[in-house]
Amino acid sequence: MPALTNRKRVLVTGGAGFLGSHLCERLLAAGNDVLCVDNFFTGSRDNVLHLLDNPHFELMRHDVTFPLYVEVDEIYNLACPASPIHYQHDPVQTTKTSVHGAINMLGLAKRVGARIMQASTSEVYGDPAVHPQPEEYWGNVNTIGPRACYDEGKRCAETLFFDYHRQHKLDIKVIRIFNTYGPRMHPNDGRVVSNFIIQALKGEPITIYGNGQQTRSFCYVDDLIEGFLRFMDTPAGVTGPINLGNPGEFTMLELAEKVIRLTRSASTIEHMPLPQDDPKQRRPDIAKARAMMQWEPAVPLDEGLDRTIAYFRGRFFS
């Protein structure tokens, strides 16, 4: 057990969500005090119930669009609905969560002198005209489309982080997260992995939008959280943004066929119209993460899908 003086106080906003709950686990295992903050719009107490008896874990209901006054050493700002179904439900609130939330967490970090990490997104690249996407690419985003509340909200949050860094010398880290999957994904979040698994386990047709040739990369959650921790431990002045994701690229048809095979489902494939502004290609260039942190994903897609299918089967179909 680390000495008390070495124990960091770490704030995780969105800590009861899919990524946040896994991050809280890892931070506790590393010997930190963890304050998990969530408004439970998409997060769930169920995701952190197993942590509540840990004396070094605290759960607080709070919306980051309002200021928060706590004493912490590090902040991971993950708070924001991240799936189209949820972030388009109340697009104004989504933008406020990204922008006001960033301002409030940056203000807190400035006040207490904390290092702060922003969970940004590959969506800042929009429907990319450059493939794969390096961090230097400025993106191709529709500023007035139905996805803009999330895409532009996250882009503005990045702007705020770098302005606080330049203007106030704040110690910032910015990570751009590509598609991530694993246990504790929300079953109704409209994301492709959870959609396909739920449909396959129910024996329903698997819904593919468009011709199914659009591509995504899929990073298992444990790999992503390892990247979070490694990047947070890089020296001050290493700000990012840095891509974290799996450079393996799969079409939607390939993913659907894998899920059908791994679930042993009788599901068929059903094609639907492609949503507006849906990216046709998405794959990270992770050269910087490899060089800077010796990080790259270790869990193959089939193995990660097996673990995720087992979670959904046990949680919702047992």
Image (cartoon, rainbow, N blue to C red):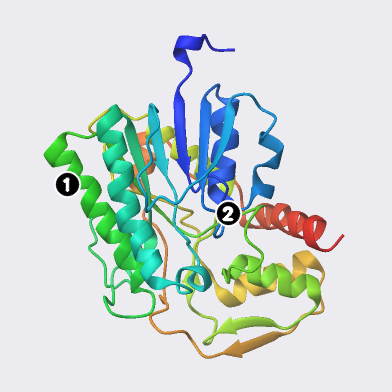
Rendered image quadrant of residue 40: bottom right
The residue closer to the viewer here, 165 or 101, is 101
281 vs 102, left or right, is: right
Q: How many marks?
A: 2
The residue closer to the viewer here, 25 or 61, is 61
Residue plotted at (61% across, 73% down): 254
Q: Position of residue 102 (x, y in %)?
A: 31, 50
- Sort mark 2 into few (<14), some (14-19) or many (20+) by Cα contacts within 10 Å: many
The residue closer to the viewer here, 283 or 162, is 162
The correct choice, above or below, for 230 with respect to 163 in the image is above
Q: Amino acid at mark 2?
A: Gly
The correct choice, above or below, for 72 with respect to 119 in the image is above
100 vs 258, left or right, is: left
The correct choice, above or below, for 40 with respect to 89 in the image is above
Residue plotted at (31% across, 55% down): 100
- Numbered disc 2: secondary structure: loop
- Numbered disc 1: secondary structure: helix
Q: Position of residue 10 (x, y in %)?
A: 45, 30
Q: Amino acid at mark 1?
A: Asp
Determine which residue is flagged by label 2.
43
Q: Can residue 125 be spotted in the picture? A: no
The residue mark sitting in front, 1 or 2, is: 2
The tag earlier along the polypeptide, 1 or 2, is 2
Q: Position of residue 191 (x, y in %)?
A: 57, 68
**Spatial separation of the CA atoms under disc 1 and disc 2:** 29 Å
Locate the N terminus by quadrant: top right
Residue plotted at (45% across, 74% down): 88
* Mark drawn on residue 163: 1
Q: Can residue 157 be spotted in the picture? A: yes
Locate the C terminus by quadrant: bottom right
80 vs 151, left or right, is: right
